[in-house]
Every structure is written in C-alpha cells, then in structure tokens.
Amino acid sequence: KAQDDVMGTPKEAFQRPNYDTIQKMMTENPNLYPSIEARFLRADFSLTDEEMNIFYYGKIFRDDYSPYHNVEWTPNIKQIMYSGNLKKSLLKKELKNINQSLADYPVSLEGYFIKYIICIGLYGDTSEEVESSMYQLLFLLRTIARTGDGTSMGSAIHVTHVSDEHTIMRMMGFSWKKQSL
C-alpha cells in the first residue's frame, strides 16, 4: 500500500488539474464558471469534484485573475485570528468586510478560513453560517489537497494564488526557506 499524504489521500491518487480541459470547457460554455461560482457561494453541497476543479483552477482563465491578487484585510483581522474574547459587534462588522472581500475574490482560501473563525465566534459551533463557511473552506482545501502533498516536485500542491500557498503551509505547520518564481 502506498503511503498516504497528510490529508489522507493515497499518493497514487494525486491528480494534477487538467488546465487545458478546464479552459476548453469554460470557452465552450461561457456560463459554466459563473453558474458554478454562484452555487459555491450559496454553499451548494452537491458540487462535484470536477465542478470544484473548474471553480478553483478555472479562475486562472478569467479576465479578473491575478496570482498576486491582494485581498486587503482590516487591521482587526489579526486580533480576531489570535484573540479569544472579542466583541460580537466587531465580529459582525468584520464578517461584512470578509463577505465583501469574498464577493470580489471568491476563491480565497484564507478568506474562507477567516470567515469560518468569525462565524464560530458569532454563532457558536453549530449554525447554518458556520456549516456553510466550513463547507466552503473544506471543499477548497480538498480540491487543492487532491493535487499533491508538496513533498516533492512530482507531488507539488497546485494553487492559483500566492496567499493560498502560504495559508496551506501555515495549516500544515510548514515554513519556507526561500521562494522563487
């Protein structure tokens, strides 16, 4: 049996995204990406792995794509991420800010992680808001994790945004020695 990666995916099951197929599908059906995006934003639990690949990796074929897209988080986000007792009024304000940022750039792994933390602070562990944000975060993570474990060039993790690379590395407890293009 092949060794499993940290997300429990067998190493032989890693699948590099088929960028050519995704681009072709999006070109042939211009409504494909917007319809999948709308379903993701509604936290549609019926999205398939293929649709999630189109949503996440298809972003690179959109006119508004930039691998260096800079999502501007407010100064309060750091406080929210690293503090235990926060006022509900601050969390509500920041949830509005996060939702606006995600409306502008809906494939932000970091944004969904922050939204999930804020929703837990506002609504507790069980609520529709927490469930939706957790679903969105986990589906993005699963889509990315299926591409590799990052332990070698052959099992590289495919991301579409520099901040996603950093978010995944932090979540896995990794740090980087150097970065190059």
Image (tube, grey):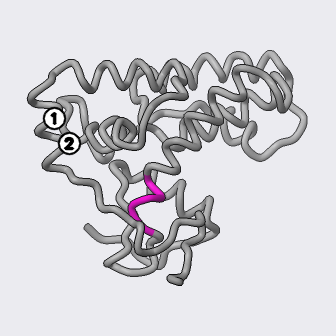
- Residue 127: x %, y % from top left: 78, 22
Numbered label attached to residue 22: 2
- Residue 80: x %, y % from top left: 74, 37
Q: Mark 1 falls on what kind of element?
A: helix
Q: Residue at x 52, y 49 (%)?
A: 141
- Answer with the quarter of the image where residue 73 lies: top right
Magenta-colored span: 144-148
Q: Residue at x 27, y 26 (%)?
A: 33
Q: Main secondary structure of the magenta part?
A: loop
Q: Does the magenta run of residues contain 55?
A: no
* Amino acid type, residue under disc 1 in the picture: Met
Numbered label attached to residue 47: none
Residue under pointer 1: 25
In space, the residues marked 1 and 2 are separated at their CA atoms by 5 Å
- Residue 90: x %, y % from top left: 76, 21
Which is nearer the eye, 161 or 12?
Answer: 12
